[in-house]
């Protein structure tokens, strides 16, 4: 296992070093707007089939939270469908206004104060997303190398931050393509060995029987909420905006979204299958966050388990590097006079230190996962108005983002994920009142 781990990290760093030669800021952040449909699709899939969509789902399935996981599994493919409908307009914004990030879009549509506020919101969101992946992959590394969780976090942050800082978006795209095939190999191999296990039929039947016993009406609301939220969350995702703005044309990003929807649907159905099997065989596991890791170790031959763990590492690393690049682009956009790529790389490293602190405070996939989804919904009404809506004042948009941010920080520790029931509605209400007040005035 250790050999697979070291070889994988060496390959990542080698690609980053090779790509980084004579790289401009535009090349570092947007791949010079030349990304093809093929690379966009593989990067989309590799980025979003990370710890949140795999390790988290399997661990929650092992706990018995079936309908919530089903909502997540169906919501991810649907999100690519919905994002595909607006991705062409996002790419056109890049051409017409030389936009680099979603914050640039807010600057163009609603003014400089909104840009700053959106940058703050997105950086907090990205930090939580990176935290999810780091927690997931750090448990993996700690389990695989038999080291402490703290040391594993330091290793993961060190490698992922340095790799992202050196390579930029082009290295991210290339390694995402490699990681996609590693992930696909893991899923096919794991599915095969599960089905040929001696007690496969008995375990699956028992798992489904126990699952139906646990079903109750209280599971329906989380399922609906998670499906609806996940279906629209890509519309405000900074990493997806980054990919859309890097596409070679509008057709490329749209087509990649349709392909991504189909591929992620197949993968998520496999993840649900793994989760059902984990529930049937690991219900008494002391730490359910390790359910996917334990499934690989118990099911696959020892000589292949190392490749399996590398596949899990690839799932998290593909999301980490995309998130770091998106954060670098947002930070760079707030400093207009930056001329050197080295300065942008420094921003990546500093942001990594900030997220490291976050992970040490909240070492839970579930806590970070639900918060990131809730927080990411805040600018949804403002984004849709910017793309499709009538003229709205910058002050109204500013308040529609700022007030829900403050309210979320206050109520989320109390009611958790249920915050998503009213946070977007609060934004819509503020915009409605603002438009009516301005019109009457």
Image: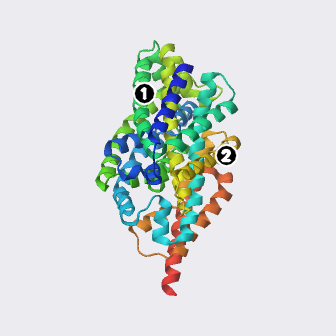
Marks 2 and 1, Cα distance to the nearest angstrom? Answer: 31 Å
- Image position, residue 154 (x, y; %): 66, 35
- Where disc 1 sits, the SS reads helix
Q: Residue at x 43, y 44 (%)?
A: 170
Q: Residues within 10 Å of mark 2 (few under 14, many from 20)?
A: some
Residue at 40 percent of width and 26 percent of height: 185
Q: Observer-nearest residue: 131 or 53?
A: 131
Residue 139 shows in this picture: yes
Per the image, the residue denoted by label 2 is 358
Task: Looking at this view, name the residue that lies furthest to the front.
Answer: 22
> Is residue 427 shown above or below 208?
below
Q: Determine whether, in the image, residue 433 is placed left or right of residue 256.
A: right
Q: Looking at the image, tell me whether mark 2 or mark 1 is earlier in sequence order.
A: 1
User: Which quarter of the figure has residue 45?
Assistant: top left
Q: Is residue 269 visible?
A: no
Total tally of numbered discs in the picture: 2
| Vertical position of residue 252 compared to residue 69: above or below | below
Q: Which residue is mark 1?
A: 187
Quadrant assignment for the N terminus: top right
Check disc 2 and report its element: helix, strand or loop.
Answer: helix
Residue displayed at 51% across by 22% down: 4
Residue extending furthest toward the top? 198
Q: Nearer the viewer, mark 2 or mark 1?
A: 2
Q: Position of residue 41 (x, y in %)?
A: 36, 43
């Amino acid at each position: 296992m250790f050999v697979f781990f070291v070889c994988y990290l060496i390959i990542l760093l080698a690609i980053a070093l090779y790509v980084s030669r004579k790289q401009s800021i535009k090349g570092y952040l947007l791949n010079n707007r030349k990304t093809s449909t093929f690379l966009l699709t593989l990067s989309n899939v590799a980025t979003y089939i990370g710890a949140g969509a795999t390790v988290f789902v399997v661990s929650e399935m092992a706990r018995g939270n079936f309908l919530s996981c089903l909502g997540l599994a169906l919501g991810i493919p649907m999100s690519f469908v919905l994002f595909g409908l607006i991705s062409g307009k996002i790419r056109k914004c890049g051409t017409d206004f030389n936009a680099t990030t979603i914050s640039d879009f807010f600057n163009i549509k609603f003014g400089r104060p909104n840009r700053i506020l959106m940058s703050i919101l997105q950086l907090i969101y990205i930090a939580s997303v990176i935290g999810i992946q780091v927690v997931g992959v750090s448990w993996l590394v700690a389990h695989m190398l038999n080291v402490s969780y703290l040391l594993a976090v330091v290793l993961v942050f060190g490698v992922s931050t340095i790799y992202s800082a050196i390579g930029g978006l082009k290295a991210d795209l290339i390694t995402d393509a490699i990681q996609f095939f590693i992930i696909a190999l893991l899923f096919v191999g794991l599915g095969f060995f599960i089905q040929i296990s001696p007690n496969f039929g008995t375990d699956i039947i028992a798992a489904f029987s126990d699952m139906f016993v646990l079903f109750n009406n209280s599971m329906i609301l989380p399922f609906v909420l998670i499906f609806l939220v996940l279906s629209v969350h890509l519309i405000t995702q900074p990493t997806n905006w980054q990919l859309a703005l890097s596409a070679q044309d509008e057709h490329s990003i749209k087509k990649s979204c349709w392909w991504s929807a189909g591929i992620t649907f197949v993968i998520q159905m496999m993840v649900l299958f793994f989760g059902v099997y984990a529930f049937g065989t690991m219900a008494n596991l002391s730490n359910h966050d390790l359910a996917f890791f334990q499934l690989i170790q118990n099911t696959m031959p020892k000589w292949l388990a190392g490749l399996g763990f590398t596949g899990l590492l690839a799932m998290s690393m593909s999301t980490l590097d995309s998130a770091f690049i998106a954060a670098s682009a947002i930070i760079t956009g707030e400093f207009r006079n930056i001329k050197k790529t080295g300065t942008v790389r420094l921003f990546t490293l500093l942001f990594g230190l900030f997220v490291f602190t976050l992970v040490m405070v909240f070492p839970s996939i579930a806590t970070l996962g639900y918060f990131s989804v809730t927080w990411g919904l805040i600018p949804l009404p403002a984004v849709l108005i910017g793309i499709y809506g009538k003229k709205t004042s910058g002050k109204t948009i500013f308040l529609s983002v700022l007030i829900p941010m403050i309210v979320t920080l206050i109520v989320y520790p109390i009611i958790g994920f249920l915050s998503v029931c009213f946070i977007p509605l609060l934004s819509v209400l503020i915009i409605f009142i603002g438009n009516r007040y301005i019109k009457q005035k």
